[in-house]
Image: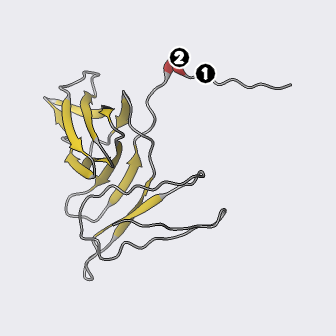
Amino acid sequence: MGGVVTVKGGTVSTLKLDGVPSGSYTVTASSDVSFVASTRITRGAKADSSTDFAWSPSSARLGSQHLVAVPRDGQRYFSFGVPEGRATVSYAPVTADGKVGKVVDVDMSGGTASLIELPAKSGESPVAGYVVSASGDPAYGALLLGRQDRPDVSVLAIQDAAAGLEKVPVTVGY
């Protein structure tokens, strides 16, 4: 699927994706000017059951050492996508007692998305978060949260990695 959508500056536009089969996808959008994009995710779309939805925000390209906090309860998934080329996404659990677990590498080819269920424990300790890194061509990711046997859904963008001394804000003026 692809195409061009023209949107006047300062306005909002909706692009319907009716007919796209249920599943995990990466949506890419580009422009010659700055813009904001998001996608709506729906769970429980059957007529006789309750429904929930979440907005998946646009995200920045994954780099190295993004720290992602995860809740102790419910279902937790990483959703990674590589629009073009090839990338390796790595993630390692960080337990509540501060220990970093074994790194898992996911090799992904362009045009693919991967949905990875995250365990509640690493060894005997509860997982408090993950360290996420990516190398190769651009890769993007989000944390998808839900509940077993319920349509609950939330999506959190993976925040920029800690920059430390790489970025220092400077204001020039009088």
Q: Which residue is mark 2?
A: 165
**Nearer to me, 77 or 32:** 32
Residue nearest the viewer, comparing 84 with 72: 84
Q: Quadrant of residue 153?
A: bottom left
Quadrant assignment for the C terminus: top right
Which element type, helix, strand or loop, lies under badge 1? loop
Residue 85, image quadrant: top left
- Position above or below: 4 against 100: below
Q: Residue at x 38, y 53 (%)?
A: 155
Q: Amino acid at mark 1?
A: Val
Q: What is the quadrant of the N terminus in the image?
A: bottom left
| Above or below, comparing residue 42 to residue 158 in the picture | below
Farthest residue in the top direction? 165
Q: Is residue 140 visible?
A: yes
Q: Secondary structure at mark 2?
A: helix
Q: Residue at x 73, y 26 (%)?
A: 171
Compared to residue 26, the image places residue 132 above or below, namely above
Q: Residue furthest bottom?
A: 47
The residue under label 1 is 168
